[in-house]
Image (cartoon, rainbow, N blue to C red):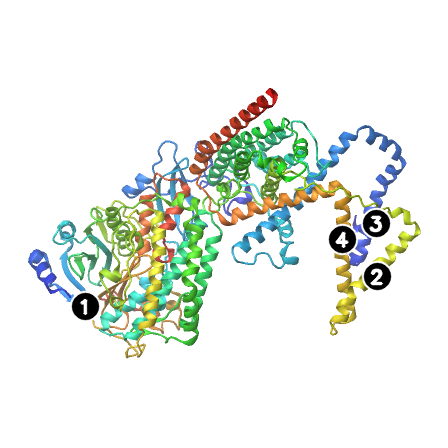
Amino acid sequence: MTVVARTWQRLTIPGRVLLALLVVGALLTVPLVLLIVFSDELLAIVGANLPIVRFVVAATAILLMTIPTAFVIIYIEMKGIALMNLRIGPDRVGPFGSLLSVVHGLKVLMKEDFTPTGADPTVFTWAPVVVYLASVMSLLVIPFAPGLFGQDMNIALLYFFAVGGLTVVGLLMAGWSSFNKYSLLGGLRSAAQVISYEIPLTLSVVGLLILAGTMSLNQLVLNQSGWFTNWYVFQQPLGALIFFIAATAEANRTPFDLTEADSEIVAGFATEYSGMRFGFFFFAEYVNVFIISALTVTLFFGGWNSPFPMPDIRLALDPGSLGIGLLLVIALVPLIGTLLFAAPFWLLRSSMPSWQALVLGFIVFNIVAVTLVLGWAFISFDWVAGLIWFMVKTYGFVFLFVWMRGTLPRVRIDQLMGFAWKWMLPASLLNLFVTAAAVIVVGALRGGR
Amino acid sequence: MDRLFRRRLEARFGDRLTGPVRQRHDQTEIRIAAADVADILRTLHDDPEWRFELLADLAGVDTGTHMQVVYHLWSVTSPDWLRVIADGLCRDDPRIPSVTFLWKGAEWMEREAYDMFGITFEGNRDLRRIYMPPEYTSFPLRKDFFLADDAARSPGGGVRPMERSHSPRDAAPGAVRQVRA
Amino acid sequence: MTVTRNLLPPHASADDPRITLDEEVGGIFENVPPYPPRTEREAEFYTLGDGEMFINMGPQHPSTHGVLRVVLKLDGEKVVDLDPVLGYLHRGVEKLCENADYHQVISQVDPLEYVSSLFCEWSPVMAFEQLLDVEVPRRAEYIRVLSAELNRIASHALFAGWMALDLGGLTPILWSFIERDEIVEMLASLTGQRMLFNYFRIGGVNGDLNHDFMSRLGDWMSRAVKQIDNDTGLLNENEIFVRRMRGLGVLDRDTALRMCATGPNLRATGVPFDVRRAHPYSIYPEIDFDIPTRTEGDCLARYLLRMDEVKQSLRIIDQCLHQMPDGPIMAKLPRLLRPRPGRAYASIEGPRGQYATYAISDGTDQPFRMRIHDPSFIHLQMVGLLTPGNLVADTMAIMASLDPIMGGVDK
């Protein structure tokens, strides 16, 4: 081992990088060779178990997707609230401070991660995992685009609420195992809050289920295709409102964010957490925001449908038919494009040196090219269109949540519980009965005709 | 300066005042013995002729020779502030009846006087230290309390008047600042 | 239950008797308080009933208005009793003033209520002027009133923002600070400092009005009303804010007088006692302004009352500007001040209440006793009176509505 240590010491930095790459490459060669040699058999296995493979890929993709989503939402919140507060917000790290949330994530990884004396180590360690998993598992059933979902179960909505209820367990675990009165208070408060608001949440969509006749989220979105008047928000306005309010309370967002009310009980159930464990809670909250926005959009606002029926344009582009011309196009178009877009800058601003004009031209060409490609993808692939519409609508709701956080103070625990049990629950029951009655009456009228 | 007020005070409390009623600017001052505090202040508070319902301040004073407790009262019946000086508390064990039965807000003011001077207010339900930690043994605002100050201890120190008065060197026994107040 | 070694203090070990691992109590918690109770009230407070527990809102807390330790006795979420522990910011200002010149007292006394420093300076300065029988020139008095009323508006702006922050709203405090920043910049161009102004002098003020100050003031006055209405509109019409504050911490007239409350806390209960009108000082008799009073006595009334006072302060500033006489800004005084032996009491109406100084002079160049009466100190007693029966979240709301500043409480 000393040979290795001495060699390592004598290498320069590029040498060390190369050595590391060599080692990694050597290690990777073995699986690569195995993959190539057994490729046929592997493909056969994959083909035979396609649903499982698809599920594994989808689950991994969702898991990996949550972190960048959390980063984006954290940035939106920081910048949005700052602008509402008439201050600037993140400014330095990255363009307009957009990389700040990434840095926050890295910082959270690097902090000391300790367990307080007297805390129950197993429960303490597993609490953030449970909370995070509850959030991530709910993402499995949300349809992002036609064909782009984790799993299309015909009890998708029920699965969603069932998994969302796991959050309570995680919060209670965190509050109890911290061995701290603040955490206990916070954990109990949030458990009470989440449980109270689960009932109006579930009841408010039952009206929707009666109308749609299915619990499959994919089917619900398909039912809302066409013009935006097909969206369920126009058929179930009260249900949508109750769902929105109850979802805000479920996700512990302002005005219902007493659990993390830092002006009262420091950080509530997460007081004793630091480092990556706190990072789990932190990310779970923002993933929750994304989930409730996504669910609101899916259930009531058309999911991945566009507000108007998209005309069926097919751009018959077949790049392969160009043959060798394709290589010429790839070589020449960027060059010509750069020169083309640089020309106005160079001609109209005589003080600009030509290399600056070329750089600007290149940037403009890139922007134009990406827009064109995206536009073509949007038009030709319906999943691209669906995904973009879905994301636009979801982030609109995310912004709405951020807006509420910046504007409203928080309610008190007894006002919150009173509101849930005395107002939301009867309202959702009313919604349910009126919907059921309407369906029966309309059915009888139609059937009788 | 309310002359009528002075006459009324002398008429009512004349025998219990331990000094003349003094008036200056907008303040009228009476001096009473420490034992009479509860009585006189209750009269001033409850009596419809006086109606001194607002206790503006309760202060302890260490004159160097003895201690005082000074009350400032305000009433709608007079434009002057009334200053009641309960005089003559001995410096070894200053005791005075508490006025918390009239004004609950005096509780903390008496706690502060106890903490800073050591004056015991009999009848105060909560006579413990308020600023200093509970284990503290001295009474800081007394005139024989000297702060252990680095400047005072240093060899060249004690040049500025502020440091000199802190210095234990100047604290010959009995060399405590006094005033006829 | 094991004790993790790296969390113990260096000299302790798991066998250290100071760390009790008492199986019944549940481990690490020491007895509260760690000494036997010495007074009736302490014994009453530190006896736990059935199902009650202590929670310590320690000196480091985002919501106690400074370094204040509050021990709460809770029954679940409801507060049964409350014991504030003071002294974390005690600087011994009264003792320091006894060893300072009369002029040096002004800078000692500034950091008491650091948010409204000019009032902290005004009261001792008035007391010393009584001892010296000095007459302050009229122009100096007008400048004092002008700058002090500006400081009152700044203090109330801070109060509004802080109140909203304690209730959970993140935006109003930043908007209030825009207000406060403008005023504080104005005062900086007048006095040289943004916060601990050190501006009033015995016999007058330190510097005359200058062009920068007047232009900023004029600029701000022209948009002040609209801006303040905009900022407070975010809160006054907010259902959640109003619901949380209405009916909370109701103080009635007799309790307020018994607790020696003054200022907006007293006026919100219906007693129209304002030192500027009840016992006029300076040039307030020449200025026309109203004393807002409300009768409900709850947190919302206290908040709205302070906003009304801001409007009245604007009126006062306007009149000061119009009636400003010419003349000197400082009376002629010797360098070394030796007032006659005697006693003086000066009381002014600060933004929090009556701010008073009782000064005893012994004929030397240092005050013999400088007693500072601070309204925040008195009002903090009321937190223990008003909170029991409410929830933990309301403790913050009540404390914020009484507007204590710990610098003044702890002196």
Give the amino acid type for the residue marked by disc 4 in the picture. Val
For this view, does A445 lie left or right of residue C391? Answer: right
Q: Which mark is residue A22?
A: 3
Along the line of sight, which residue is nearer the eye, A429 or A98? A429
Along the line of sight, which residue is nearer the eye, C240 or A288? C240
Residue A88, x across and y down, in percent: 56, 58
Q: Residue B25 carries which label?
A: 1
Residue A258, x across and y down, in percent: 48, 41
Q: Which chain carries label 4?
A: A
Residue C251, x across and y down, in percent: 29, 46
Residue tagged by mark 2? Answer: A336
Residues at marks 2 and 3 touching, judged by CB atoms closer than 8 Å: no
How far apart marks 1 and 4 lie (CA) works out to 84 Å
Q: Considering the numbered disc 1 on the image, is that residue within a helix, a strand or a loop?
A: loop
Q: Which chain carries label 1?
A: B
Give the amino acid type for the residue marked by disc 2 in the picture. Ile
Q: Do labels 3 and 4 share a chain?
A: yes
Q: Do labels 2 and 4 share a chain?
A: yes
**Quarter of the image that includes the C terminus of chain B:** bottom left
Q: Which mark is residue A370?
A: 4
Residue depicted at 61% across the width and 21% down the height: A447
For this view, does A191 lie left or right of residue A141? Answer: left
